[in-house]
Image (cartoon, rainbow, N blue to C red):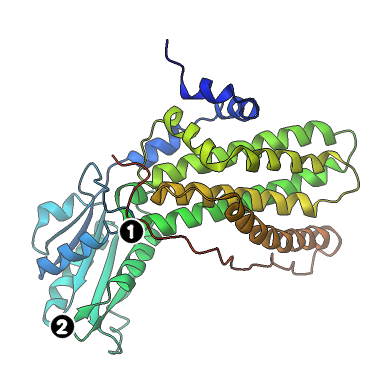
Amino acid sequence: MARSPFSALSSLGPFSAILSVLREVDVRPARIAAETPFLIAFVSHDVQFAEHLATLMYRGDRPTDTPPYRAAIGTPITDATQISRANVVVIVTRDDPQLDEALRLKRALEASNVPLLMCFVQERGAPPPAQSVTSGHAVTLPLDNGALDEQTAIERLTAAIRQLKAIDDLALARHLPAFRPPVVRALIEDVAMANATYSLGSGLLQINPATGLPIAVADTVILTKNQAIMAYKIALAMGLPPDFKHVMPQIAGVIGGGLVLRQVARRMIGLIPGLGIAPKVAISFAGTFAIGEAVYRWSRSGERLTEDGLKAIYALAVERGKDLAAGLQRRCATRPTEPKAKPSPPEQAIIELPPAPSHNGAAQSY
């Protein structure tokens, strides 16, 4: 009988404990969210231009992607059938004569509580549309001598559509490649911050010798689960096969046993009295961030980070984790003793990652 990928990996020894945690992870909600169908309709008098904007939503690092259905379309502003079935409507207007009809459609959709985005296309440097026209969600796309600045258009459209919160981020990224970089970056950031914050809370409880050991053990399990779910969500967002048992052993290999075991070993800091909470918080942030970055680069292009590459990303993330730990500790210190004082926010710093090589291939495809 053929062995499953999980049983094959478990024979490698170090992965055994990690895989026992992964087997307990419930990934069904993430898979359901990522695979829920949706439709974004770009509507305009200029149907060819609207279709071009819809096509930009399919532009990404993996040109071989073929999502299973059309999630973004361009359609005439008069096509009530297509507009009525859309989860999000993007009303595209390029000329003033088109504006009256676009605004009538806007008012009708608002009355029906349909999520919509007004999209104004105009020459760079032109006066912005009147505030009465841009009320609600609106975005302006720049033209340079009549030619669309496509990269700016992609960045602004993806950000504005995500802000509507009408479609789950995982679904947007899975079916429209233009959404993948911002969605995955936000996911990595959120989980790294959540793990760091959790580590601070559990670290404070571990100061009590009576509760320290059980909490430290539970801490490792919870952080590992969070990292596993993050890795699986990245795979979903990047359009990889949704079978958890198929993709997670591959991800475990991409992350590398060295990084995983290093994380588990360093979390033992929590079991040793007197070493402080800050190192634990910094390591939780950095380890989660490095795992997310490794999985993202592999999912995007098949790139496997070298040990030196992982160390470079990890070192940069540790420095930010230290700043985050200091900020969180200041907030905890001031809240109980000085209730009227405003807590200082965690110090933020942008992580300048080592450049990733450009690839045309894909790690996986549908």
Determine whether, in the image, residue 98 is placed left or right of residue 136: left
Residue at the (82%, 63%) spot, across then down: 334
| Three-letter residue code for mark 2 | Asp
Q: Position of residue 216 (x, y in %)?
A: 77, 36
Q: Say if mark 1 contacts mark 2, CB within 8 Å.
A: no
Residue 103 visible in image:
no
Query: How far separated are the C-alphas under marks 1 and 2?
Result: 29 Å
Which of these two is toward me, 252 or 42?
252
Element marked by disc 2: helix
Instruction: Tell me what residue is drawn at x 45 percent, y 50 percent.
Output: 303
Q: Earlier in the sequence, mark 1 or mark 2?
A: 2
User: Which amino acid type corresponds to the residue marked 1 in the rendered image?
Assistant: Ala
Depth order, front residue of 313/280: 313
The residue carrying mark 2 is: 96
Q: Where is 316 relative to 13, above or below?
A: below
Q: Which residue is mark 1?
A: 178
Extreme residue in the top direction: 1
| The N terminus sits in image quarter | top left
Is residue 218 depicted above or below 355 in this figure? above
Q: Position of residue 306 (x, y in %)?
A: 55, 50
Q: Residue at the spot x=46%, y=16% of the render?
A: 3
Element type where label 1 sits in the image: helix
